[in-house]
Amino acid sequence: MDNLLEQNLVLNTVNLSKKYKDVYAVKNVNMHVEKGDIYGFVGENGAGKTTVIRLITGLAAPTEGTFYLFGEERDGALNKHRVAGIVESVSLNRSMTALENLKYQCFICGIDKTDEELREILSDVGLDAATIGSKKAKNFSLGMRQRLGIASVIIQDPEFVLLDEPMNGLDPQGFVDMRETILRLNAKGITFLISSHILSELDKVCNKIGMISKGELIEEICVDDLHKKSDARIILSFATAEAAGEAATKLAPFPIFADCVTADDVMTVYGDVDVNEVMAILVNEHIQIAALNVKAKSVEDYYIEKARR
């Protein structure tokens, strides 16, 4: 690995695996979160997202492999001064106000913060202490409770925060509030790893995406590249699988076909590709096709196709 990249890594997992009895929950996961990232960790329910987060936060021990935080190999113990996380659900005392919850969390963690400092933290997560006043957490919306949960972990001034499905169940306004909170905190220097089973939620806030399916990391991709690959695709159908294979060989030298996949009698060309240029190359190379279709594609379509390969 490039030394400069290695120095910039907040999290690096190396063949990270967890087995329960004879079944792997996650297997050989190699992920890379750099300083300043908002890293989206996406996968279907049961894909292994929470298991990976539990391993990194020390709530479970790897069966095989290891991971590094800030360049140092970890034994599973969470470094509370640099790393914090919310796993599965937010832990709050619902009979307390937002400020009381933060003061109680400070007491548990042995952290010395003034009320003014805690009010500023609440403001950082989009909660105005003056407005919510004596309102108990039990009367908060789900989005407000989720953001109060984030406030309760950033009182430790962490550099890296892991959030397990923080947008799950939020209404549209709650999602916007959560997105703005994460972006605001990221601008203040906090690196994030955020899991979700909905890719379209993550690609609006993250700069990098890690895709996991059936316990295996299938791709890491920056969001700009994800959008390029998701914008459109050209599907070429051939008379036979053999014809498709021969065409793939002839077309391989052309840059426009650099990102394509051939399966059976179909070739799919990904990216921002000019269909007229594709047709011109096919004609010049005397390649016959049975059909050509241009289709728009969502980011979810891209994930599903990757997971099926």
Image: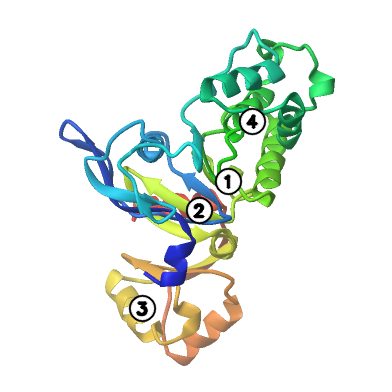
Q: Which residue has dot 1 on it? A: 202
Going from N to C along the chain, the mark reached first, 2 or 4, is 4
Q: Disc 3 marks which amino acid? A: Ala
Going from N to C along the chain, the mark reached first, 1 or 3, is 1
Going from N to C along the chain, the mark reached first, 2 or 1, is 1
Q: Quadrant of residue 121?
A: top right
Going from N to C along the chain, the mark reached first, 3 or 2, is 2
Q: Which residue has dot 3 on it? A: 248
Q: CA distance from mark 2 to mark 1?
A: 8 Å
- Foreground pick, 67 / 31: 67
In the rendered image of this protein, does residue 178 appear above or below residue 251?
above
Is residue 295 visible to the viewer in this orientation of the structure?
yes
Comparing marks 1 and 3, which lies closer to the viewer?
Answer: 1
Q: Which residue has dot 2 on it? A: 209
Name the mark on residue 151: 4
Residue at 31 percent of width and 80 percent of height: 246
Q: Disc 2 marks which amino acid? A: Ile
Please tell me how crowded label 2 is: few (under 14), some (14-19), or many (20+) other residues with Cα within 10 Å. many
On screen, residue 2 versus residue 8, left or right, reads left
